[in-house]
Image (cartoon, grey):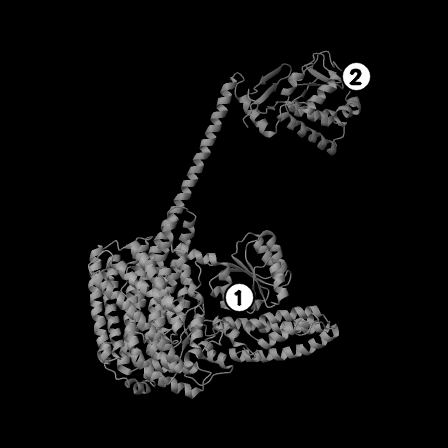
Amino acid sequence: MSSAASDQEESASPVTQADLRKPDNEPQSANSHGGEEGSADDGGAAPDDANTLTSGSGTTSSSASVATSGGVPDFVKKLFRMLEDTSESDIVGWGVNGDTFVVREPNEFAKTVLPKHFKHNNPASFVRQLNKYGFHKIRAQHEDGKLYGDSAWEFQHPNFQLNKKEMLESIRRKTTSKGKSAAAAAPAAPPSVPTSDDKLTTILRKDTTDLQSQVDNLTRLQADIAGYLEGLSRNYRMVVEEVLNFRKNMAAQDQVIRSLVNYIAVKQTGDGFPEYKSISNSARQELPSLVADDTGQSSAFAFAKNINLPTSSAAVPLSQGGFPPGFNLEDLGRTAVELPKDESQRIYSNYENVARASVHQMNEISRHVRQAYSIIQSVPSGLASGSPSSGAEAAAASAGGPSTPLGNTNSFSQPGGMSASSSCSPPSCAPSQMGGFPLGASQQGGLTVFTVGGFTPRRDDVASEAGQGRSSPARPPNSMRVTRATCVPPWSVPPKVLLVEDDITCRKLSSKLLQVVGCAFDVAVDGLDAVERMGVGTKYDIVLMDIVMPNLDGVTATNRIRQFDQFTPIISMTSNTTENDCINYLANGMNDILAKPFNKHSMLNMIERYCNHLVGQRAAALGIPMAIASAGRRWEGLPSNPSGNSGRISEIDMDEGSPSARVGENTSQQMALSSSSSSRKGKEPAVSLPTSTMSTSDAVAATTALVGEMAREGGMSADCFSDVLNMSLNEMTGLGILPFGNIVPEGGYMSALGLDQYDARGAGSSSASSSQPLQPQHQQHQQQHSQQQQQQQQEQQQQQQQQAYPSYTSYTDATNQQQQQQHLYSHVPSSSGGGSGGGGSANGGGGGGGGSSLLSVPRLRKRSRDTEGTSSDAPSGLDASSSSSSRADSAESAAAHHLNQSHQQHQHQHNHHHAGNPADAANSSAMYISTTAAVGSKKPKTNHL
Amino acid sequence: MPSDEIVDHNIFDQLLEMDEDDEDRGFSRDIVTNYFEQAETTFSSMDASLASKDLQALSRLGHFLKGSSAALGLTKVKSSCEKMQHYGNMKDEHGSGSLSEDEALKRIATLLKQTKTEYHEAEKYLKEFYGMP
C-alpha cells in the first residue's frame, strides 16, 4: 500500500496534526492513534443490535467506495448536514470553537435526530462510525466542569469544522489493520522528516523487495533447471547402459541361435531329420478334420518328397551335397522315429532364457526412454528431436555402443545389422522349436515392449480339445506347439482407455484384451463411476462403455459425460444391437458400437479407428514421413486376402483366428507342398518384410528382423508377416507355430513383396541422408563394387549348378548364406562406424548394411538370387507334390512365375547398373538402392493393386 | 458357426489364447470359475424373481447372464438368456410382439429350466476341460 498515511497524533490537550498526505491522487487512509480512546461504550445504554450494526457497516462500505472515488463520504456529508440543521441545536450542534461538535442530549439524539439523518436509532453505531472516520471523543477537560452538560458528547476531527465544507474531503474512513501497521511505522520516523524522504524510502523498499523476489525466482528456476538437467543426464546414462546390456544379450542370443543352427545341421548330417517327427506329429494333431491315419501318412509322405530342399539348404555343405531326390523318402521313414527331443528342448529353453532376458532388456530400455521422452517432451527445443532417434537407437540395440552418438539416426549403420542377420540360420530349423520365438511384441514408436507372456510350448491338448470338442485323441505327449497371444500394437503411445463394464466376466475379459492389445486402461464398474472418472479430468483417448449397468446405464452416463466432454470417443459395448438401440446410442452421444461378444481383433480395430492419432505419433516420433508410415500400415488388411486366395480358409473367419482353424487350413492340403516350397518361398517375404519394417520404423529393427528370420524358419507365410510387420495386431497366436507354415499364396507373396517398396524407399532416404560419414565414400563404394562383381560370379556359379543339379540350389544358397554370415561376423568386430557395415552389406545378404534400413537392400538382392534358384527349381518340387494338391500347385506355379519375372527384372536392372556405372563412386550405393526399389515397386503394382 | 454347440470355440478359443503359455490356464480358468459363480447366483435370483413375478428383474438378469455367457461362447445359454430378456419385456423370443404377463411368466418358467440344463451341460463340459472337480 503506497499511499501515505494521513497521520494524526492526539495528546491530551493540544492536538498535533501531521498530515502526511501525498500529493498524488491515490486513496488515502486516515489513521489515528488513540482513536480507540473515544469510547463507544459510553453510550452502552443503547442495545447493541446486530442488525443495525450490519446495516451501519453496510452504509459504511458504500460510503467508503464513494470515498475512493474522490467525493465526501456519505456519513460525513450527513453528519455535516445534520449539524447545519439548526432546528435541533439544543440536542446536537457545533461546539463553541467550531472545531468540534457536541451531542448535548444523547438520549434525545438517538430518539429523534439519528433516525432522521441516519435511518437508525443506535447511538453506539453512530459513535462507531465516528471512530471509523477518525473522530475523537473529547473528554470533559474544561476546568469549569462540564461545558455542555454532564451527559454531553463532544467529538472532534481536525478537518471537520464549522463552515469548512471543503475540508470534508480529507476525512477518510480508517483502513483496517494494514493501515494501522503502516501508521504504527510512521511515528517511528521523526515527524520532522520531510515527506519526500519518506516517499523515497518507500520506493526504495519496494524496489528492494521486488528485486529480492526476482532473485528468488531466478534461483528457484535455476535449481529446477539443474535438477532437470541432472535427470536428463541420468536418463541418458541409463539408456546407454541399457543399450550396452541389450547388445550383450543380443550377442548371447545370437550365440544360442548359432548353436541351434549348428546343432540342427549336425543332427541332420548325422541322424537325418530329427525335427520332422514332431512336425508330422503336430501336423496330425492339427488336422482334426481329416481322418487321422490318412493325415499322418499323407503328410509324412509329402514331407518325404519335399524335404530335401530345406534340409540340404540347412546343412553344412560337406556331407549333404549330392542328395538324390529320392533319398529323403526313405530317410524320413527312418528318422521320423527318432526324436532328439531333449537336446532340442535344451537348446530351446536356453534360447528362450536369453530371449527372455533381452525382452526384459527391451522393456527396461523402453521404460527409460519413455521416461526420458516424457521429460524431453516438455522442452520445446532441439532436444526434442534428439529423443526419438535415441529411442530408436536404443531399440536397434545392438547397433549402439557407448561410442554411438545417441540421437544420431544415421548411426544405425553399425555392427547393428548383425543381430538381425545373425539369426539368419538355415531355413529348416525345426519349426516347432524355432517357432517359439520369444520376443514379445515390440511396439514400434514408443519402444514399449508388450510382453504379455513368455513363450513356452503349449500343449496340444487344448487346441485339439477345443477343435474337437472332446478330450484327447491319441497323440505324442511330447509334441509341442507354441502360441502367442501377444500382438504388436500399432501405437507408440498406448491409448488410454476407460473401460466401463459392470459384469465381472466381461470386465476381466475386456481388460485382458486391452492389455493384450497394449492399451493403458482404467476400469469403471458402472455408469456413475464412469462419469465420475471422466469428470475428475482424467483424459482418456477412448471410452468403452457397457450399456446395461446398475446405478447408471451406459446411455445415460454418456449423456452426462457429453455435458462436459464432447470429444472423447465413447464406444458402446453391447449385445443389444438392434437398429433402434444403435440409434439411441448414437443419439446420446456415443460414437460407435462395439458389438458383444467382441474379440481382440474387433476391439483393436475399434480402438485403432479412434486412436489413429496415436499411431501417427509413432511415425512422428521417429521422424518418418506419415506417408510411409501409413503406407506400411496399409497392409494391415491383407491377411485375409491371401487366405482368400488359398481358397481353403475362405469360409473360415480369419478374425476369429482360432488356432485350429488356422491349422486346419494350413495342413489339410498344402502340407505336402509347403514343406519344400514354403521353406524356399517363405524366405522372400520373410527377408524382405522385416527389413521393410525397419524402414517404417527403425526402432525395433533388430528385433523385428529377428522376428522375420525366426518366422521364416518357422515357415510362416507372407500374410502372417504382413501382420507382424504392420504391427497390425493380429492373431499371432493363430500364426503361432505352424510347423510348415502356409504355402505362400500369390497374393500374400506379392503383398509381402509390396512391402519391399517401402523398404527400399526407406533405405534410399536413409542412405541419402546418412551417406556413411565415417568412411570415405569412394572406398566404400569400391568395396561394394567388387563385392557386386563377386556376387555376380556367385550368381553365375549358382545358375550353373542349378542347371546341373536342381537340388543343389539350396545347397549353394546355404553356402552363400554361410559365407555371408561369416562375412558379417568378420565385419562386426572391426566395424567401428557406419562405413564398414555398409561395405559388408553389399556382399552380405545380411551384412549389416548401412544401418537397419540399408540392411534390407543387399538382403533383398540376395533373396532375388534365391528366387532365381527357387523358380528354376520349382517345377521339380511341383512334380513331386502335384499329386497332393492341385490347388496348391497352381498357387505355387503362379508364385514361381512371378518369381521368375521379378528376378528377370531385377537381374536386368542389376546388370544394367553394373555395366553402366562401374566407376560411379558417389552414386553407386544410391543407385543400388534405387534399382532395388524399382524392382520392389513393380511387384506390388502389378500384382496387388 | 453352428449354434447348437455347447461352446462356440471361435469365441472360447479366444479366451484360451489369453492364457498364453500358462499351463494352468490361469486366466481363462479364473474367468470360467467366475462365470460359474455368477451363473449360480443369477439363477437363484431368477428363481426368486420368477416366484415374485418380477418380469423386469428377469429381463435384467437374463441380459446380465447373456453378456458373460456370450463372452465365453456358451451359445445355448446365451440365446436362452436372450429369450428370457425378451420375455421379461413381455415380448416374444425375438424381441417383437407382445405377451401377456402370465404368458411371459409361463414361458420364462419353462425357459429357465431349459437354461439351467444348458448351463449345467456347459458347466460340465468346461469343468471337464479344466479338470475341475
Give the number of the disc on residue A510: 1
Along the viewing direction, whichever of A730 and A93 lies nearer the viewer = A730
Q: Quadrant of residue A725?
A: bottom left
Along the viewing direction, whichever of A667 and A546 lies nearer the viewer = A667
Q: Where, quadrant-wise, is the N terminus of chain A in this rendering?
A: top right
Tell which circle, 1 or 2, labels the residue nearer the N-terminal end: 2
Chain to which mark 2 belongs: A
**Left or right: where A869 falls relative to A588:** left
Residue A914 visible (yes or no): yes
**Left or right: where A877 falls relative to A65:** left
To the question of a shared chain for discs 1 and 2, the answer is: yes
Q: Quadrant of residue A738?
A: bottom left
Residue A475 coordinates in the image, percent (x, y): 43, 84
- Residue annotated with mark 2: A87
Q: Nearer the viewer, mark 1 or mark 2?
A: 1
Residue A842 coordinates in the image, percent (x, y): 25, 63
Q: Quadrant of residue A398?
A: bottom left
